[in-house]
Image (cartoon, rainbow, N blue to C red):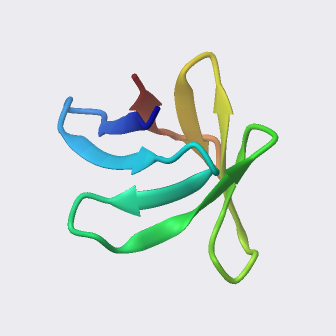
Amino acid sequence: MNRNLYSIDGKPFAYITDDGYIYEFNGKTYGYFTDNNIYSLAGDYLAWLSDGWVYSSNGKAIFYLA
């Protein structure tokens, strides 16, 4: 079952598939999710998940998971 990521203002941004890939609703692959971390397709660290919130690498809340 896919899970949606929402921006701070509540707009749907992307979804996470059962295999951990993150897709924007426009079809672009954003990256992948593993062990509460988000990486680009190239393997660069982007963010982490904690208590339903996604935080950027500088610690700013950028999305929430619903």
Give percent across and percent down for residue 17. 50, 47
Nearer-the-camera pick, 63 or 15: 15
Nearer-the-camera pick, 47 or 30: 30
Residue appearing at x 58%, y 40% in the figure = 55
Point out the image quarter for the C terminus.
top left
Q: Residue furthest bottom?
A: 42
**Left/right of residue 59 with respect to residue 4 in the rendered view:** right
**Left/right of residue 17 with respect to residue 49 in the rendered view:** left
The picture quadrant where one finds residue 42 is bottom right
Give percent across and percent down for residue 22. 49, 57
The picture quadrant where one finds residue 7 is top left
Q: Is residue 24 above or below residue 53?
A: below
Nearer-the-camera pick, 8 or 22: 22
**Left/right of residue 28 with respect to residue 51 in the rendered view:** left
Instruction: Report the number of discs.
Output: 0
Give percent across and percent down for residue 13. 28, 49
Residue appearing at x 39%, y 46% in the figure = 15
Q: Is residue 54 above or below residue 23?
A: above
Q: Residue furthest right?
A: 35
The picture quadrant where one finds residue 43 is bottom right
Q: Is residue 33 above or below residue 52?
A: below
Residue appearing at x 24%, y 58% in the figure = 25
Nearer-the-camera pick, 45 or 65: 65
